[in-house]
Amino acid sequence: MERPSFLSRSSSSLSSLLSNDEKSLLPHTVYRKPKIRVRTLLAHCLYRRVILWTAAGIVLICLTLTASRPGFRSERLLDLVKSKQDEKGSIGVSGASGTSGANIVNSVSGGPGTVLVVGSEKAQVPAWRSDMPNWLRFRHLDGFFVGLKALVPASDYRPEHPRPAGEDSPYPLTLSYTGMPTPTPFVPQPDYKSPGYTAQYHEVAPCYLDKEKKIPVPDLYAYNGIVQGQPEPAIGSHSLLGLRDDVCFDRFGRYGPYGLGYSFDEGGVEVGMDTDRTGSEAVWARTGKINYDAVDWGDAQTRCFGSNKKRFSDGEMQSQPSPTASAEHADQSTLHRERQKKKIPRTAVMVRVYTGYQWTHHAVLNFRAMISELALRSGGEYTVHFLLHVRDNNEAIWADPVTAQRVLDDNVPAEFHSICTFWTEEQMRLIYPGQFGRAFTNPSSGDIHGVYRSAHMPLQHFAMSHPEYAYFWNWELDMRWLGNYYELFDRLGKWGKQESRVEAWERSAKYYIPKYHGDWANFTALVHNETRASGRPAVFGPVAFAGRAPLRSELSGQSFIPPSCASRNDAAADCGVGEDADLITLNPLFDADESGWIFASDVTGYNTNLPQPPRRCAIITASRLSRRLLAVMHEENWRLHHSMFSEMFPATMALHHGLKAVYAPHPVSVDREWDLDAVDAAFNGGRDHSSGGRGSPFDLRNEHNHKGTSWYYHSEFAGLLWRRWLGYAQYDGRGPNGGRSGEGTLRGGKREEERAEGTGRMCLQSMLVHPIKWEHPSELEDYV
Ligand SMILES: *[C@@H]1O[C@H](CO)[C@@H](O)[C@H](O)[C@H]1NC(C)=O
Ligand SMILES: *[C@@H]1O[C@H](CO)[C@@H](O)[C@H](O)[C@H]1NC(C)=O
């Protein structure tokens, strides 16, 4: 879901509530950019026609010369970028002074075989005043920005932060640099050929990028080890979720297989060539530089699924109150018994695309990676869809194929056209008709069918018309996973499945800070104690409240509680273990009541003379929803005319009806050397040491605490870190004011990464970053 209103909110009407240090979201303009845009060229109808004719001519010529080339699309992009380079001189280099503020490396004598001494920067911690945010007390961390020359085996790794009390900083580090390390393919999918796999599951047919089955789907590359001193995530955990924590990813290992770092002529996207590329060739050693010119991702996904059909259960996975479904179900279970092998449920990844989005080469790379890793490399376990919001209700997309094609041409790169599904708000009015009644409050003054308040309506509709999928990831354009998408989505799903339902709502309401709380068992015990101390019973099963209306399935006596929870008592901790989660969120599921979260009372269709129904919410709508949760939301919308603000609706429906919901504590980094008790106080400062209720970190007055985290809708650190990792110089936000985005010194970028006495380009452990509003410095002007 796009976030224009959030952005305008924090910069205008509510800005009086935010301190000066929080107002600036972005660095100052770093590069001037010609007023020409990739999309404009891609989109322009006239231009297209010219190109098609030109292409037809070229094809004819090529045929005569028997050397056909498919890629006229890239040539257009090529021309564009060439013209940019001419105007700018060189992209991505300017300003990255090699010496200014450069004190990461104190001394070195040059190339391989030398000793590097890597020091910490002299921290400029401002004089703190009580009217400043608490986190300004803490100095910025340096370890994120140290490069590959400082890679060490995981066993030797010592993080700069968090450190046990009394342990010294790992800086200065003395490292023997013996040459660039070599990355290796990173494969988080099961070993499909192993006897263990084939004994249980159907055989997996490999998938290809092309119809002729000549181009296998590549793997991305990782470095074995961690950059010495790199901070560990303060919140969440790799190992808890089953994510590898002993490898790191640089930009070429992550995106090189999909077109980063090579030219349009070679079938790449020609970005990343303006950054340090030392040793990057390793990622193309096996596959060569893949030519993506002719790839049709929808076609590739369809072929991949087609050759793997027998592996999957197709549709109506969960018990759904539908008379037609039960007959099919019986058939299927007989089939299951006949063929002993386990079937795998299918998952759709729904990327929320919208008209007007400015596509960039970096965004293209990100979705090539997503489709390759999740859909193709998994033999069709996932399917990526673009749910394309056509914002102009007057476009005749349903009536006229030419209009539909124009909307696609104008708004989505051609390689993704075949994975797009249109939707409009007008269509939602048709699907969810009738009167919705009053909201307790409606701070955004938005329409109930609008994407801002009811982002899930089109997802519900999609799920109802696609029974082949059991799970649906809701995903947004300005999110990036620094790592392999299959590893992320698969491990989150598995972790959610093995979580107990006992006190799951209470654990999910709290940020997990491993170095402060101990391991997950400690955390579970702590939450248990805190719940008991709160005097409130733990949530279990459907909640009762005044004015509650039952679903049809509830009226007919059905329940979402699994048999393992039948004899519920506190000892039955296996209740729900092995049950796939209906909702997996990427931020805590907090109690919205009295939380100070601005939309906490945007609750529609309930009796406003009664107290508001109990609510849970997770900020950022990226999450996995089960078919049955979406069916519940669908029924609540169309039949009961209930609705709630987008980030609150799925979690609250799960709460009301006893579905299984978990917050997956994925790794989140902080940019400063916070004391961990300060992290806990800031992020779990709500009622009963949770993130909800009074004192919540999602209170408008407390949200600033997230500015320096890698995952929050208004985070500043996420973009800074991501762009430095991509190889572009960024203002480091450090300085006498205590650090404002866009201030400080321009650091990183090609010149700094390449200099002999530097540590090279960055290599980070896997992490989610959001929001990524721009990537290449030339986009900055578009955004501001
Ligand atoms: C976690 O629990 C174990 C076993 O009860 C205990 O030894 C350890 O001290 C706990 N750690 C923390 C950080 O509470
Ligand atoms: C929970 O409470 C018990 C009994 O009061 C105590 O022994 C235990 O240390 C507490 N555990 C945690 C993790 O707080």
Image (tube, rainbow, N blue to C red):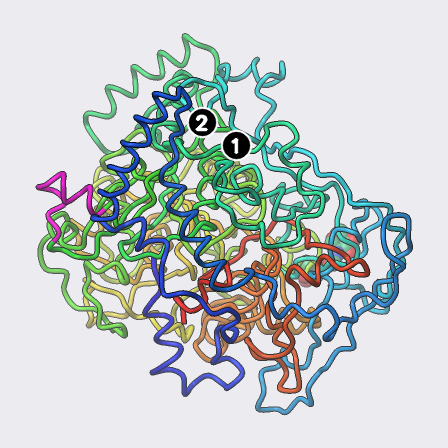
Q: Is residue 559 visible?
A: no
- As shown in the figure, which amino acid type bears the numbered disc 2? Leu
Q: Residues within 10 Å of mark 2 (few under 14, many from 20)?
A: many
The residue tagged 1 is 290
Q: Position of residue 76 (x, y in %)?
A: 37, 46
Asked if residue 56 is among those painted magenta in the image, a careful observer would answer no
- As shown in the figure, which amino acid type bears the numbered disc 1? Ile
Q: How many marks?
A: 2
Query: Distance from label 1 to label 2 (Cα)?
Result: 10 Å
Viewer-nearest residue: 300 or 605: 300
Q: Residues within 10 Å of mark 1 (few under 14, many from 20)?
A: many
Q: Position of residue 553 (x, y in %)?
A: 24, 39
Query: Is 488 positioned to the left or the right of 311 in the image?
Result: right
Cβ atoms under marks 1 and 2 closer than 8 Å: yes
> Which residue is pictured at 63% across the width and 17% down the height?
194
Q: Quadrant of residue 644?
A: bottom left
Q: Earlier in the sequence, mark 1 or mark 2?
A: 2
Q: Nearer the viewer's eye, disc 1 or disc 2?
A: 1
Please tell me whether mark 2 sits on a helix, a strand or a loop. Answer: loop
Q: Which residues are magenta?
A: 395-407
Viewer-nearest residue: 454 or 213: 213
Q: Position of residue 57 (x, y in %)?
A: 28, 32
Q: Ligand 2 lies in which image quarter?
A: bottom right
**Could you tell me which quadrant the N terminus lies in?**
bottom left
The residue tagged 2 is 209
**Could you tell me which quadrant the C terminus lies in?**
bottom left
Q: Is residue 279 visible?
A: yes
Please tell me whether mark 1 sits on a helix, a strand or a loop. Answer: loop
Q: Position of residue 416 (x, y in %)?
A: 34, 39
Viewer-nearest residue: 372 or 108: 108
Asked if residue 404 is among those painted magenta in the image, a careful observer would answer yes
